[in-house]
Image: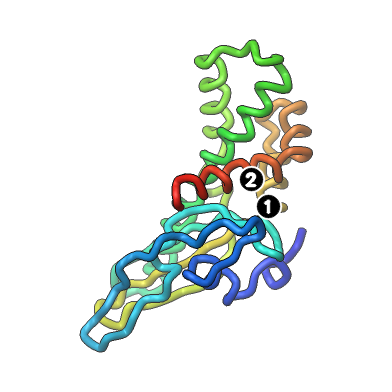
Amino acid sequence: MKTLATMLSLGLLCSLLSTSCVTGNNNPPPPEKQPLYNPKQVQAPAWVFGGSGAVTAKTGKILYGVGSAPKMMDISMQRDRAANRARAAILKIFNTYIAYMMKDYARSTSAGDMSKESYEADVLQVQKTISIGDLNGAQLANTWRDPADGTIYILMALDLESIKDLLANKKELDAKLRDYVRANAAKAFDDLEKEEAKRGK
């Protein structure tokens, strides 16, 4: 598995969410949002507004999420809370990613005969096997503290190899599905990224 140092640099994800971002498939950058300001006129970095999403860069395919936590006496607890919220943001986009993968899997196994209800039940079953705890492999990409109120913002990232390993090691899943995941993880990611581009993510 590629390490974070190889897959990401701190500047990479910052630029991925900035207006100068150029993704691997030349998707348009995310729309600009109103920046945060404080009395000292310190502007928040662009990634603070990124939420969750999927992006392809020269270094690989990445799911990302942003979490925040208000000022607390225990700064370690504050960072943990922000990181957990960032993982929750990744989990949200991860579940959408699963839906794209299962859609293709259903086509490949049922020749298009699977009912909508059966498909949705299978998607939900796979999604239920993944929890925030499974996303501990997501790695810290950047941190920003708002000097006005002490709020911490954390950017977390999960690369495609980690995603494939996570799904392939889920013994609750059918062996055939796990093999399919290994072979088609990148395609499902591309489908998700294209759909985000259509929505203007």
Residue drawn at the location 45% of the way across and 46% of the way down: 199
Q: Give the vertical position of 168 relative to 76 (above or below).
A: above
Q: Nearer the viewer, residue 157 or 192?
A: 192
Q: Give the vertical position of 63 relative to 171 (above or below).
A: below
Secondary structure, mark 1, is: helix
The percent position of residue 108, horizontal first and vertical second, equals 73, 22
Residue drawn at the location 64% of the way across and 45% of the way down: 189
Image position of 147 (left or right of 119): left
Q: Give the vertical position of 127 relative to 190 (above or below).
A: above
Q: Nearer the viewer, residue 95 or 41?
A: 41
Q: Nearer the viewer, residue 50 or 148?
A: 50
**Amino acid on which the number 1 mark rests in the picture:** Leu
Image position of 101 (left or right of 64): right
Q: Give the vertical position of 133 relative to 150 (above or below).
A: above
Q: Which mark is residue 189?
A: 2
Neighbours of disc 1 within 10 Å: few (<14), some (14-19), many (20+): many
The percent position of residue 184, horizontal first and vertical second, equals 73, 38
Q: Quadrant of the N terminus?
A: bottom right
Instruction: Kindly report the distance in space between the C-alpha atoms of the residues bearing marks 1 and 2.
Output: 8 Å
Q: Which mark is residue 160?
A: 1
Query: How many numbered callouts?
Result: 2
Q: Earlier in the sequence, mark 1 or mark 2?
A: 1
**Amino acid on which the number 2 mark rests in the picture:** Phe
Judge depth for marks 1 and 2 and give the one in front. Answer: 2
Q: How is the image coloured?
A: rainbow
Secondary structure, mark 2, is: helix
Please say whether residue 137 is visible from this viewpoint: no
Residue drawn at the location 65% of the way across and 22% of the way down: 106
The percent position of residue 97, horizontal first and vertical second, equals 57, 41
Choose top left, top right, bottom left or bottom right for residue 167: top right
The percent position of residue 105, horizontal first and vertical second, equals 68, 27
Residue drawn at the location 60% of the way across and 72% of the way down: 12
